[in-house]
């Protein structure tokens, strides 16, 4: 049995990181927005460390908090980012982690256009 996940209206809001921050097209190519689908408390540092360990990038990866369940990952090497996207979906503590490309500076990071994920429920 397969289920599809989709965003509820509240999750479709566009986020502004910092007004003075300018995201160049080169930077946006190396960024992913991450959303942990969980309403439970979790340790943000444990989440970020686990993601870095599981993704095992060849070059540097930084992850910063945006809001409660939302994070911005910045890869030094775009090949690491593409591998992470290719190996989707990801999970942390049995909760799905959505990933979404960050567009250029003209568009604030958002999960608005994230497509659904299919997965088996056992």
Image (spheres, rainbow, N blue to C red):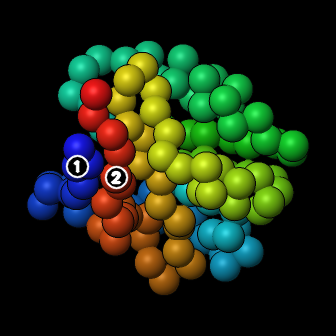
Q: Earlier in the sequence, mark 1 or mark 2?
A: 1
Q: Which residue is mark 1?
A: 3
Residue at 80%, 60% in the rendered image: 79
> Does residue 90 show up?
yes
Real-space CA distance between mark 1 and mark 2, rounded to the nearest whole angstrom? 6 Å
Q: Quadrant of residue 93?
A: top left
Give the x, y percent position of residue 110. Answer: 37, 64
Q: Which residue is mark 2?
A: 118
Give the x, y percent position of residue 103. Answer: 53, 74
- Looking at this view, name the residue that lies furthest to the left: 9
Q: Are marks 1 and 2 in contact (CB under 8 Å)?
A: yes
Q: Give left or right: position of 86 versus 75.
A: left
Residue at 28%, 28% in the rendered image: 122
Give the x, y percent position of residue 58. Answer: 87, 43
Determine whether 19 is above or below 42 in the image.
below
Residue at 63%, 69% in the rendered image: 28
Determine whether 115 is above or below 66 in the image.
below
- Looking at this view, name the residue that lies furthest to the bottom: 106
């Amino acid at each position: 049995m397969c289920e599809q996940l989709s965003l509820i209206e509240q999750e479709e809001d566009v986020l502004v990181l910092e007004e003075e921050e300018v995201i160049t097209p080169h930077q946006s190519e190396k960024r992913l927005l991450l959303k942990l689908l969980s309403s439970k408390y979790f340790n943000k540092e444990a989440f970020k460390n686990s993601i870095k360990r599981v993704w095992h990038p060849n070059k540097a990866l930084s992850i910063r908090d945006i809001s409660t369940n939302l994070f911005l990952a910045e890869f030094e090497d775009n090949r690491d980012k593409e591998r992470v996207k290719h190996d989707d979906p990801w999970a942390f503590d049995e909760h799905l982690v959505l990933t979404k490309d960050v567009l250029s500076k003209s568009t604030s990071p958002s999960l608005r256009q994230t497509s659904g994920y299919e997965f088996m429920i056992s």
